[in-house]
Image: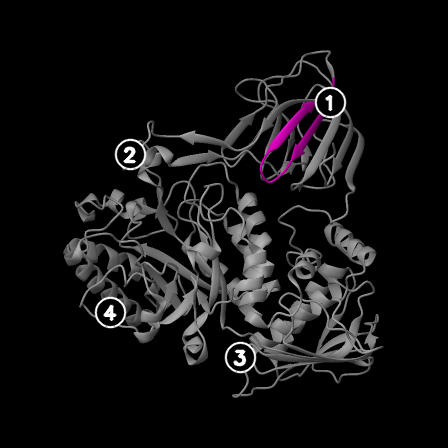
Amino acid sequence: MSFTNSFIKAAVMCCGVAFCATPALADVNAKPFTVPEVSTWKGGKGKFIPSSSSRIVTDAKDPAAARIAQMLSQDYTTLTGSSIAAAPGVKAKKGDITLKIKPDKKAKAESYSIAITPAGVVVTAPTEQGLFWATRTLLQMSELSGDLSLPVGVINDSPEFALRGFLIDCGRKYIPMDYLYALVDAMSYYKMNTLHVHLNDNGFKYHYDNDWDKTQAAFRMESSNFPELTARDGSYTKQEYRDFVAYAASKGVEIIPEIDIPAHSLAFTRLKPEIASTGRNGRDHLDINKPETHEFLETLLEEYIGGEDPVFSGRRFHIGTDEYQGDSLTMEQFRAFTDRYITFTKNHGKEPVIWGSLTHAKGQTPVQSEGVLMYGWSNGYAKPRDMIQQGFRMVSIPDGYVYIVPGAGYYYDYLNTQMLYNNWTPANIGGVVFTGDTINQIEGGMFAVWNDHPNNGITVKDIHHRVMSALPTMAAKTWSADKVTVPYEEFDSQSKHLSEAPGVNYLAQFGLEPITVLESASVTPGQKMAIEEIGYPYTIEFDIVGAGEQLGTKLFESPNATFWLSDPISGQMAFSREGHLNTFRQNILPGEKLHVKLTGTNTNTKLYVNGKLVDDLGVSWIYHVEGDSKEAKRKMAQVRTLFFPLTQAGNFNSQISNLKVQNFISE
């Protein structure tokens, strides 16, 4: 069992939350807790306990089931430390888990059934996807069981909505590919099946001296036709993107790539100034009337959705179309632009996806709706009932409910999960609630992280903390909608006992109970530590006898961060991560004996010396425009949080002793 999962399992056993407290008949097993919860449960008596001879059995003629069995076997070992071998093509016996794909045109594609008896488990599904989701249910039930047992009973499960997703803005902030993989793993564990990757965007001009030339803009894909377009501060090669899409598909997650046009397009106009709008919109708008604009765009898009081996190999492609501004004539032109690129996308064998903007863009120019998926994000930009009436299929992603903008001070920093769990389903688009047959035009629901404020100190770790705070709730509500039965407080408490995914601990957390994660009587230069890092909340304490240190002396480092004993500029204690250096008002003098304590939360990092608070590096607000104007109220935060690095000690001269790492804030 992994270090992380052992702590989780210990907490589960201690708190006794293997199953939810749904009232049940005496001796009949209660409905097991999972996220999302299963649709129906018929409890029996007793339990199934895997043994050392248990196997995961599949039919010899079913390679898809065999692949899923192998994944279940690997994930089970990773999650629990015990093993159940995959056994394709053998006859099931007592103690086995059997996986079967049985096509059924009348069943939902993602549905499945699990029959658990004391003698074994039989899982059936009409599709490979449904069978895979069933294995996620088995893994969660095993993880929350104190003895790895499964309660006897029958599960029949299927989602209320076909699309259950999350959007991440990679345009304003580069999101490394390793995190996208971890994100897919986490989404898959909670049966979220769609990840939208927003590949280009730009910051707000008012944060950059109102100068378009200074304003952040990026396009995150490698380009052969326009090499200079590819962002220099982080991008994806075509092959690694292909590999990522294939990996996600193996985990039941569809990737929807977005190239956002004709607004949010500063990266394109910076490369080709001649295609920029010259009107009041500004240079992040394309001039949609110029032939040169269409020549550029169609050459660019062809590079990713064209050819025999397209980079964007999934079935859907998002063409943007949000927040384009202009007069009534411009809106007619925008509608023609939207329809043109819907057709372009269809002609390349992709299902077009667009942002809802056609109420904002009033006009007579027709925009086709058949075979088009529209995101309902703002009812002012697209009235949901009108869009449904026009024939669009909708994704519910209402900004006032499900938009996270980390550290920005508007929308949500963390989603209001209690409100969402109790009051929202994908049938609710910005307060407009659909019932009856119109629900059939709602494909599903998503939430989003928008990195509106580039370079504000928010790290990928900070983003993930916000994502995982919301993901269980969004998974529950997009799968079960208004059919959830577990009270929110119980759901919130129990869901915290689940892992992010088998083998994934991107939050670097070590259980729910307060513990000392790591202790060391002394730390020697270059020493390898037992853990890579610890996420907030945490307390780090150590004693130090100072010695002469050169600028740039590290105390600890990890792949994600460095804690400096003497930072490269001032010689003070400091930490750096993702290009930001944050300095404490404290240096270490030769011969000085100090007790140092650091605490970290999702809002600040504090330094105490000899029991006294020296520095509290919390959120600071930077104002970019003076005066009382609207622009003066547009501020940007500087966030100074830290996942404390512990992979390896640096090459220091001072003496470090009595290191203690705790997973809570020690006063």
Disc with the residue nearer the chain's start (1 vs 2): 2
Residue at image mark 1: 611
Q: Tell me how far mark 2 sits from mark 4, CA to CA.
A: 34 Å
Q: Secondary structure at mark 1?
A: loop
Q: Secondary structure at mark 3?
A: loop
At horizontal 54% and vertical 50% (from top left) the residue drawn is: 179
At horizontal 74% and vertical 62% (from top left) the residue drawn is: 143
Q: Quadrant of residue 174?
A: top left
Q: Tell me: residue 280, above or below residue 119.
A: above
Please give left or right for residue 478 compared with residue 663 in the image.
left
Residue at image mark 4: 367
The boundaries of the magenta stretch are: 594-611
Residue at image mark 3: 109
Q: Nearer the viewer, mark 3 or mark 4?
A: 4
Please give left or right for residue 380 compared with residue 76 in the image.
left
- Residue placed most toward the observer, 520 or 239: 520
Q: Are marks 1 and 2 in contact (CB under 8 Å)?
A: no
Q: Position of residue 557 (x, y in %)?
A: 63, 33
- How packed mark 3 is, by other alpha carbons closer than 10 Å (few <14, some 14-19, many 20 or more), is some
Rendered image: mark on residue 210: 2
What amino acid does circle 3 point to? Ala
Q: Quadrant of residue 433?
A: bottom left
Q: Are marks 1 and 3 in contact (CB under 8 Å)?
A: no
Q: Tell me how far mark 1 sits from mark 2, CA to CA.
A: 45 Å
Q: Tell me how far mark 2 sits from mark 3, CA to CA.
A: 51 Å
